[in-house]
């Protein structure tokens, strides 16, 4: 193969890049000559990946539960990459903002549509056989999901609904103390914090406070408002608002509703529902109509806010009753 002028130009650019950092170009070339070619299994760390499923029981369906949650956390990581890219961009273009919001919606759409892997993919008897061995671990303890919430909207919008008005002018730290999920982390019979929440807060609370303060002026809503101030066409504004409304629904209605649907299927039992492994009050924590957390209330009508999540929950309950 002959060296073309274009190839020589690229090689010279590479030399300039390496030598500009005070490093020796020929040392790099020698290293590249000895380097092994990449293969698929090493690149994605396949053996490591497949070694991360460690069931705590011998129940056959437990790996389904583990693998699905690991996949979920990887999607959450993808979502956080998009949020952090939006937050850190010095100059944010409308098209780039729209593309990244659409990516977030695709990730949550994929999570929602794939939930059947777990929802319908495990026998109830098998799930109930291994679930007690998981206590007090709970999906409630997903720190990445909490980070996503903090990166999407102002903290006040994810404060427990009953406390929002009184905290409108409060500090981020005070608002965080009243964040909605802390109410769902209480044992209903005593009102005391569930141990799963105590563990979770001890491990991650400082990280959450740091994230809340870091995102205060650069969360998705703030970056959207910045784009509006800089001027948007009617078409651009409508397109961005539609994408943000879908994100609001995906994170605050569709995703928790899928959890609720699965919880009802596996934990609903008359006359008393089965408790969650973490001791959290799933009946009140999961349904979106109880939490009524809305990232972008300005994008919804008063009626839509008042009825937030109600029709979706009612539809799911009818579906579940129809299956029984």
Image: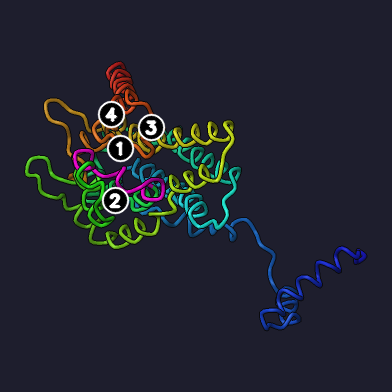
- Going from N to C along the chain, the mark reached first, 1 or 2, is 2
Disc 2, disc 4: CB below 8 Å? Answer: no
Q: Is residue 133 visible?
A: no
- Of the residues tagged 3 and 2, which is closer to the observer? 3
- Of all residues, the one furthest to the right in this rendering is 2
| Image position, residue 141 (x, y; %) | 29, 51
Dot 3: within a 10 Å radius of its alpha carbon, few (fewer than 14), some, or many (20 or more) residues? many
- Of all residues, the one furthest to the left in this rendering is 190
- Of the residues tagged 3 and 1, which is closer to the observer? 1
Q: Quadrant of residue 212?
A: bottom left
**C-alpha gap between disc 3 and disc 1:** 12 Å
Q: Secondary structure at mark 3?
A: helix
Q: Which residues are magenta?
A: 149-164
| Image position, residue 253 (x, y; %) | 35, 32
In the picture, the disc for residue 141 is: 2
Disc 3, disc 4: CB below 8 Å? Answer: no
Dominant SS of magenta comes to helix
Q: Is residue 63 above or below residue 260?
A: below
Quadrant of the drawing holding the N terminus: bottom right
- Going from N to C along the chain, the mark reached first, 3 or 4, is 3
Dot 1: within a 10 Å radius of its alpha carbon, few (fewer than 14), some, or many (20 or more) residues? many
Q: Quadrant of residue 34?
A: bottom right
- Whether the magenta-drawn stretch holds residue 158 is answered as yes
- Of the residues tagged 3 and 4, which is closer to the observer? 3
Pick the residue in front: 219 or 70.
219
- Of the residues tagged 2 and 4, which is closer to the observer? 2
In the picture, the disc for residue 265 is: 4
In the picture, the disc for residue 254 is: 3
Pick the residue in front: 91 or 121.
91
Q: Secondary structure at mark 2?
A: helix
In the picture, the disc for residue 293 is: 1
Please give left or right for residue 2 compared with residue 290 in the image: right
């Amino acid at each position: 193969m002959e060296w073309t002028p274009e190839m020589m130009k690229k090689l010279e650019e590479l030399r300039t890049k390496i030598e500009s950092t005070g490093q020796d170009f020929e040392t790099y070339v020698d290293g590249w000559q000895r380097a092994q070619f990449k293969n698929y299994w090493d690149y994605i760390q396949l053996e490591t990946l497949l070694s991360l499923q460690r069931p705590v029981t011998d129940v056959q369906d437990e790996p389904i539960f583990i693998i699905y949650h690991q996949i979920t956390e990887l999607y959450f990581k993808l979502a956080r990459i998009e949020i952090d890219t939006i937050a850190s961009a010095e100059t944010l273009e409308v098209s780039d903002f729209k593309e990244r919001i659409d990516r977030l919606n695709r990730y949550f759409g994929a999570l929602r549509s794939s939930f059947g892997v777990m929802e319908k993919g495990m026998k109830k008897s098998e799930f109930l056989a291994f679930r007690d061995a998981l206590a007090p671990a709970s999906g409630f303890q997903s720190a990445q999901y909490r980070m996503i919430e903090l990166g999407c909207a102002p903290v006040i919008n994810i404060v427990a609904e009953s406390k929002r008005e009184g905290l409108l002018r409060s500090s981020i730290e005070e608002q965080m103390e009243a964040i909605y999920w802390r109410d769902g982390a209480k044992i209903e019979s005593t009102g005391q914090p569930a141990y799963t929440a105590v563990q979770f807060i001890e491990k991650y609370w400082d990280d959450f406070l740091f994230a809340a303060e870091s995102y205060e002026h650069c969360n998705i809503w703030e970056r959207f408002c910045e784009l509006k101030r800089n001027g948007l066409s009617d078409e651009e504004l409508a397109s961005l608002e539609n994408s943000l409304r879908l994100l609001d629904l995906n994170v605050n209605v569709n995703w928790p509703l899928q959890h609720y649907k699965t919880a009802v299927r596996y934990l609903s039992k008359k006359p008393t529902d089965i408790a969650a492994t973490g001791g959290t009050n799933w009946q009140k924590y999961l349904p979106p109509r109880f939490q009524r957390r809305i990232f972008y209330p300005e994008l919804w009508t008063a009626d839509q806010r008042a009825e937030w999540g109600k029709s979706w929950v009612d539809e799911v309950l009818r579906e579940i009753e129809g299956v029984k």
